[in-house]
Amino acid sequence: MSSQTQPQPQPSSTVAAPDANTKPTAVKFELSDAGKHGKPLGEGKYIRTAGCLIIGDEVLNGKTRDSNSNFFAKHMFDLGIELKRIEVIADDEDEIIEAARRMVDKYDFVVTSGGIGPTHDDITYPSIAKAFDMPLTLNTECASRMQASIAARGGFQQQTPEQVEARQRMAMFPTGQGAEVLFVQEDKWVPVVRVMGKLCIFPGIPSLFEQLLIGLTPYLPLPPDSAKPFRHLIFTEMPESSIAPFLTELHNRERKNGVRVGSYPMLYKGVHVSLIGLDEAKIRELGKEVAEKLNGQVVEAAKQGA
C-alpha cells in the first residue's frame, strides 16, 4: 500500500490585488529537459498503442461533455499511434486503480483526464499512487510555481490554512522510482505527471488538457516514419448499402496484407471510404480501384504524422 505525506498547514497568505488598469504579469517557467525524459520505455522502443481514461462523475451523469478523448484520438492518429481504447469511469478509487493497472499492462502510452483539483472528489493522484505502490508527496517545485502564478494574477488575497492545504492537493503527486514530473508549457504551472514510463496524468479542463498534450509530445518516444501508416480517403455519393458487397470483398482480400478498410456515411450525402496500411504504394493502388469501382474521388492521401 502507498503512504501519503500531507502538506503542513501554512499561515494565511495575503497577496495585493493588481491595479484595475494593470494587466496581470505573465509568468514564464523553465521547461523540463526533454533529453532526460524522452525514452521512458527504454532505449530503441517507441509508442505503438495508446489508451485513454476519462475520469469523472460529471461526464457519466451528462453534466460535462467530454471533448478530451476526441482531441487525444486525433492527436494520436496524427502521430501515427494506434489508439486502442477509450474508457469513462467514475471518481472511484477502486475503478481508477483497476483501469490504470490494466491499461498500463496492455498499452505503450496511457493518459488520464480529470480528478486532479482541490476538492474531495479529486482523487486521481492518490489513486494512481496507490495503484503502483508509490508514496504521495508534496512536489515543492510545483507548489512554488503555483504560488508564483497566483501572485502574478493577484488572486487569492486571503486564504485560511485549510484553504491553502486544499490548494496544495494539486501538487501532491506519486513519487519515487518510476515517477516523473514534467513541466511542458512555460506559461503553465500545472505539470504532466508520468508513472511507469507510460501513464500520464492530465487535468480535465479541455483547453489545459490540449495545451499540455501538445507540450508533452517532445517527451514521447514517437514512431519512426517507417512505422507510420498511410491513409487514403475516397468519397462516393453511392449509399452505403450499395457499396457494402464490394467493401466486404476488399476487406477479406486485403486484411492479410495489413490493410484496414472502413466506411463512414454522411447522412443524405454519401460515404467516405478509408484505406489504411503501411505500404503506401499498395494503398494508393487500392485507392484508385475503390475510386473507380464506386465512382468516387480521392479527398485525402497522406502518411500519418506527415
Image (tube, rainbow, N blue to C red):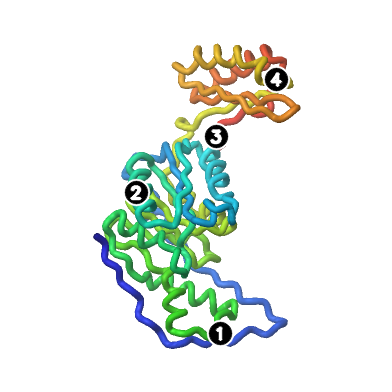
Seen as rendered, the residue at the extreme front is 61
Residue 77 position within the rendered picture, expressed as x and y whole percent measured from the top left: 53, 38
Q: Does residue 198 appear in this view?
A: no
Which residue sits at x=61%, y=25%? 263
Of the residues under marks 1 and 4, which one precedes in the sequence?
1
Q: How far apart, in angstroms, are the residues tagged by discs 3 and 2?
A: 32 Å
Q: Name the residue type under label 3.
A: Gln
Say which element carries label 3.
loop
Q: Nearer the viewer, mark 3 or mark 4?
A: 4
Q: Is residue 224 above or below residue 87?
A: above
Residue at the disc numbered 1: 157
Q: Nearer the viewer, mark 1 or mark 4?
A: 4
Q: Within 10 angstroms of label 4, few (less than 14), some, or many (20 or more) residues?
A: some
Q: Name the residue type under label 2.
A: Glu
Q: How far apart, in angstroms, are the residues tagged by discs 1 and 2?
A: 40 Å
Residue at the disc numbered 3: 304
Say which element carries label 1.
loop
Question: Badges 3 and 4: C-beta atoms under 8 Å apart?
Answer: no
Which residue sits at x=45%, y=48%? 53
Q: How far apart, in angstroms, are the residues tagged by discs 1 and 3?
A: 48 Å
Of the residues under marks 1 and 2, which one precedes in the sequence?
2
Q: Within 10 angstroms of label 2, few (less than 14), some, or many (20 or more) residues?
A: few
Residue at the disc numbered 2: 98
Question: Badges 3 and 2: C-beta atoms under 8 Å apart?
Answer: no
Which residue sits at x=61%, y=16%? 244
Q: How far apart, in angstroms, are the residues tagged by discs 2 and 4?
A: 43 Å
Q: Nearer the viewer, mark 1 or mark 3?
A: 1
Residue at the disc numbered 4: 239
Q: Name the residue type under label 4.
A: Pro
Q: Within 10 angstroms of label 3, few (less than 14), some, or many (20 or more) residues?
A: some
Q: Name the residue type under label 1.
A: Gln
